[in-house]
Amino acid sequence: MALAVLAAALTGCATIMGSPTQTLPIGSTPSDADIMITDESGIQVFAGKTPTSVTLNKSTGRYWGGKKFTVTISKPGYKTQVIPVAAGANGWYIAGNLIFGGLIGWFVVDPLSGNMYTLSPESVASSLPADATAHNNKTSDGSISIVLLQDVPASLRENLVRVN
């Protein structure tokens, strides 16, 4: 019994129940948009296309070092969106240490492990607005470009003429 009490006093609940990483689902409308994720130091940690899921570290490895990320989603013909993602204290850290971990969990174990954090938002679902000034017809010789309807900005769709 004394050993169980000692073990609980020397650990933090978020360290026991949490993990150092979190998977962040990322989607966009339209899909197949470019994603770039940079951390608080400006270091690129991921590049890819939507939809995807990315596993990110929640801690910088420093005492009280919650990570911060910038998710940039872009696609030609659409305005780029920038979404901040930041680590914040989770419920196991707050309530769990109140009941089980005590001061050692609050101020030593959990802040050092980084498992006390949850990234927020927990998922990114971006709806990219059309860029009315963008188009992908870059020809200057009068030729025609064929594009998908989803790649035509909504403001230009009223000018489309059906040919069949």
Image (cartoon, rainbow, N blue to C red):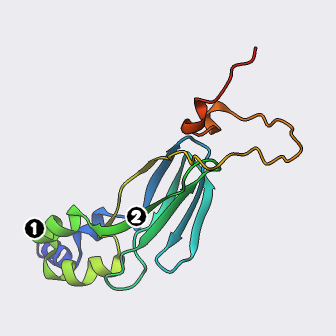
Q: Is residue 88 above or below residue 132?
A: below
Q: Secondary structure at mark 2?
A: strand
Name of the residue lying farthest toward the top? 164
Residue 82: percent from left, percent from top: 47, 61
- Name the quadrant of the C terminus: top right
Which residue: 77% across, 34% down? 146
Q: Earlier in the sequence, mark 2 or mark 1?
A: 2
Which quadrant holds residue 63? Answer: bottom left
Which residue: 22% across, 69% down? 93
Q: Secondary structure at mark 1?
A: helix
What residue is shown with label 1? 99
The answer to whether marks 2 and 1 mark residues whose Cβ atoms lie closer than 8 Å is no
What residue is shown with label 2? 85
- Name the quadrant of the N terminus: bottom left
Q: Residue type at mark 1?
A: Ile
Disc 2 from disc 1: Cα separation: 29 Å
